[in-house]
Image (tube, rainbow, N blue to C red):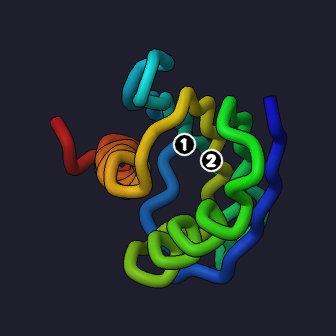
Amino acid sequence: METLEFRFDSKPGVRPDHPALCGVVGSGNLEILVKPGDQPGCCQVHIKTSARGFGTTWRAVIGDFAASHPAGGTAIAINDMGATPAVVSLRLAQALAEYQGGAR
């Protein structure tokens, strides 16, 4: 397992008090937990992945997400079992929507 930590500036979004969980840990998939973070203009991301050596790819995918979604004020934990960048992007958007109340 490899552990990665990233922090990106992002527009502040809705900050509910409850966390949101999306996805499942399994082959080719991942789970994402979104909860309130401690910096309103920042998205903090902690990743545990079975796919070692893809830090640059993770940085690009999470950076694109933080730039295109109001993820400021969040702390995101990702448990990955080899998800593709497209699946990561989809799950991030789903988890943030659930967290912010838009995926009900």
Residue 38, position in %: x, y?
78, 59
Left or right: 54, with 64 as reference point: right
Residue situated in front as seen by the camera: 45 or 20: 45
| Marks 1 & 2, CB-CB < 8 Å contact | yes
Left or right of 15 in this view: 49: right
Q: Position of residue 71 (x, y in %)?
A: 51, 67
Q: Is residue 37 above or below residue 51?
A: below
Which numbered dot is residue 86? none
The residue positioned 30% from the left and 46% from the top of the image is: 94
Residue type of the residue flagged with mark 2: Ile
Which mark is drawn over residue 76? 2
Q: Is residue 18 visible?
A: no
Residue pictured at 48% horizontal, 30% vertical: 30
Upstream in the sequence, badge 1 or badge 2?
Answer: 1
Amino acid beneath label 1: Val
Is residue 62 found left or right of 39 in the rendered image? left
Disc marking residue 34? 1
Q: Residue at x 38, y 27 (%)?
A: 23
Pinpoint residue 80: horizontal percent, then vertical percent: 58, 32
Q: Residues within 10 Å of mark 2 (few under 14, many from 20)?
A: many
